[in-house]
């Protein structure tokens, strides 16, 4: 088998290099420190508003969660109370060591359930206080923002360039051509 040598001619492509522009120094906008501070305050107020909303939402969720837990604990407590009363009835009917043990276990279970219920009630009370505080803070911040927005809009209206009223001379000049036109048409 005869192999042919194929000559590969590569065309050399001239590399094109893009000329880079010399970077001109960035022109810094001159912003007054007052404007920068106003922007910072506006951003901080927006963040504060978001945090107030989050705190109020989380407090409401916490209250709802604890209420659910308290309802379950109260149901368990009622069931434990019924078991204790049933065990006490058994002891009255037949006083044996087994019924006395059963009554003691029922009392202990009721005591622990009552403690958990009391703790949940205290947590619910604290959560409601936190909810009221966050709700009041949110209402205050909302009212304050409304007042500031109203002030800003009133200020902008007050500082708009006012339309100048036509002076008496201008009014006379504008009225004069109309009078001339009416005189010309009347004389014809």
Image (cartoon, rainbow, N blue to C red):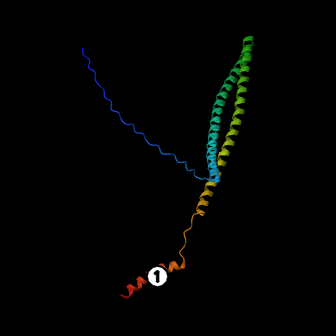
Q: Quadrant of the C terminus?
A: bottom left
Answer left or right for 185 relative to 139.
left
* In the rendered image, the vertical position of residue 103 relative to residue 14, given as above or below: above
- Rendered location of residue 153, percent (x, y): 59, 58
Residue 182 occupies quadrant: bottom left
Mark 1 residue element: helix
Kindly identify the residue that appears in the image at 52 percent across and 48 percent down: 24
Kindly identify the residue that appears in the image at 51 percent across and 78 percent down: 171
Q: Which is nearer the eye, 161 or 129?
A: 161
Camera sees residue 127: yes
Farthest residue toward the bottom? Answer: 187
Residue 151 occupies quadrant: bottom right
* In the rendered image, the vertical position of residue 169 relative to residue 74, given as above or below: below
Farthest residue toward the top? Answer: 97
Kindly identify the residue that appears in the image at 64 percent across and 28 percent down: 72
Residue 93 occupies quadrant: top right
Camera sees residue 143: no
Q: How many marks?
A: 1
* In the rendered image, the vertical position of residue 104 relative to residue 72, given as above or below: above
- Rendered location of residue 68, percent (x, y): 63, 31
Q: Which is nearer the eye, 34 or 135?
A: 34
- Rendered location of residue 146, percent (x, y): 62, 53
- Rendered location of residue 49, percent (x, y): 62, 45
Q: Quadrant of the N terminus?
A: top left
Answer left or right for 146 relative to 185.
right
Mark 1, Cα crowd under 10 Å, few <14 / some 14-19 / many 20+, is few
Q: Which is nearer the eye, 161 or 127?
A: 161
Q: Which residue is mark 1?
A: 176
């Amino acid at each position: 088998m005869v192999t042919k040598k194929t000559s590969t001619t590569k065309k050399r492509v001239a590399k094109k290099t893009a000329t880079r522009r010399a970077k001109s120094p960035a022109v810094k906008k001159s912003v007054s420190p007052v404007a920068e501070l106003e922007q910072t305050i506006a951003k901080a107020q927006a963040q504060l508003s978001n945090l107030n909303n989050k705190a109020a939402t989380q407090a409401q969720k916490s209250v709802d969660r604890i209420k659910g837990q308290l309802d379950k604990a109260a149901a368990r407590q009622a069931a434990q109370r019924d078991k204790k009363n049933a065990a006490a009835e058994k002891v009255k009917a037949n006083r044996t060591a087994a019924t006395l043990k059963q009554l003691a276990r029922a009392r202990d279970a009721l005591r622990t359930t009552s403690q958990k219920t009391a703790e949940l009630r205290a947590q619910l009370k604290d959560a409601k206080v936190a909810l009221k505080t966050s709700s009041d803070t949110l209402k205050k911040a909302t009212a304050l923002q409304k007042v500031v927005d109203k002030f800003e809009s009133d200020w902008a209206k007050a500082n708009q360039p006012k339309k100048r009223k036509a002076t008496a001379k201008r009014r006379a000049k504008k009225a004069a051509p109309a009078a001339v036109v009416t005189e010309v048409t009347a004389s014809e």
